[in-house]
């Protein structure tokens, strides 16, 4: 079975500061990892994904994530956040089959 | 349409009522998923269709939940005899192919409140 853990339920950060949202995964098979963003009252939007190859993955809106097999982590980072990045961020994993298993989410709140 | 469309956007039901939630996927998308998102939680898988075939319904919480996609396009999630614990946002997602590599496109969801 696959699972992801997002340890931080909320992350406050000032605008233009860097941010890291943490995600750890557990899987007994090859993993494919994803980060999704959910703006208020909207559906989820794919930020980036790791399937294979380079462990550093770049996504939309300046976000990137690094797959670390030894630490079973897939943390999301952005060097300088903007107020518009305020949203809920979900880490997800696909193992066997093609259904996503999501974490509980991290609310990123960017303050002026 | 340009994206996945879900209706109604909001639904209030009295306990015991039946509800039907509709999903219009992106035209031509083979795969269709339903997820349930409780308040403060991540989405949880309910069921998956490949065209009209329901290949996985392991996430449906009880036999009160039923989903169909009879012509391989529009899908309906039906909940019979609704209970308060059914209150959640129900998300539909579709993808062009059936592999995990094919990006999922989510609708804005239907917020169901059972009173």
Image (cartoon, coloured by chain):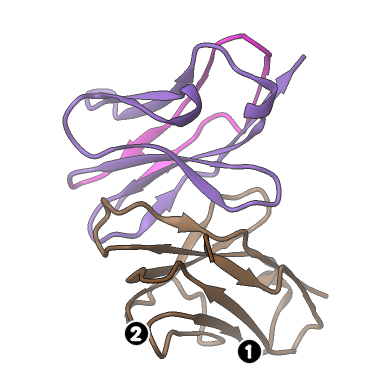
Tint of chain A: purple
Give the class, few, some or many, for how many residues have Cα within 10 Å of label 1's Cα (few <14, many ≥20).
some
- Quick one: quadrant of the N terminus of chain B? bottom right
Taking B113 as reference, is A43 left or right?
A: left
Q: Is residue B63 above or below residue B3?
A: below
Q: Residue at x 46, y 20 (%)?
A: A77
Position in image of residue B107 (x %, y %): 56, 61
Q: Quadrant of residue A26?
A: top left
Q: Circle 2 sits on which residue?
A: B52
1 or 2: tag closer to the N-terminus: 2
Position in image of residue B73 (x %, y %): 42, 80
Taking A84 as reference, is A48 left or right?
A: left
Q: Quadrant of residue B86?
A: bottom right
Residue B72 is covered by the magenta coloring: no
- Quick one: quadrant of the C terminus of chain B? bottom right
Give the class, few, some or many, for how many residues have Cα within 10 Å of label 2's Cα (few <14, many ≥20).
some
Q: Circle 1 sits on which residue?
A: B80
Q: How many marks?
A: 2
Magenta span: A3-29
Residue under disc 1 on the same chain as residue under disc 2: yes
Q: Which mark is in front, 1 or 2?
A: 2
Q: Residue at x 68, y 70 (%)?
A: B85
Position in image of residue B36 (x %, y %): 56, 64
């Amino acid at each position: 079975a696959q699972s992801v853990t997002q340890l931080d339920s909320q992350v406050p950060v000032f605008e233009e500061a860097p941010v890291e949202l943490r995600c750890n995964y557990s899987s007994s098979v090859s993993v494919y990892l994803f980060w999704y963003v959910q703006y208020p009252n909207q559906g989820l939007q794919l930020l980036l994904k790791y399937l294979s190859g380079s462990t550093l993955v770049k996504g939309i809106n300046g976000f990137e994530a690094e797959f670390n097999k030894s630490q079973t982590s897939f943390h999301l980072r952005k060097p300088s956040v903007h107020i518009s990045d305020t949203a809920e961020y979900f880490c997800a994993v696909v193992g066997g089959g093609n259904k996503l298993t999501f974490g509980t989410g991290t609310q990123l709140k960017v303050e002026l | 349409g340009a994206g996945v469309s879900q209706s109604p956007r909001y639904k209030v039901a009295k306990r015991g009522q039946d509800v039907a939630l509709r999903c219009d996927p992106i035209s031509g998308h083979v795969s269709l998923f339903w997820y349930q998102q409780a308040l403060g939680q991540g989405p949880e898988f309910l069921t998956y269709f490949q065209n009209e075939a329901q290949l996985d319904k392991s996430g449906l919480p009880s036999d009160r939940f039923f989903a169909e996609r009879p012509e391989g396009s529009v899908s309906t999630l039906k909940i019979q005899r609704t209970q308060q614990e059914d209150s959640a946002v129900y998300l539909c997602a579709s993808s062009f192919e059936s592999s995990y590599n094919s990006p999922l496109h989510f609708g804005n969801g239907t917020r169901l409140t059972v009173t």
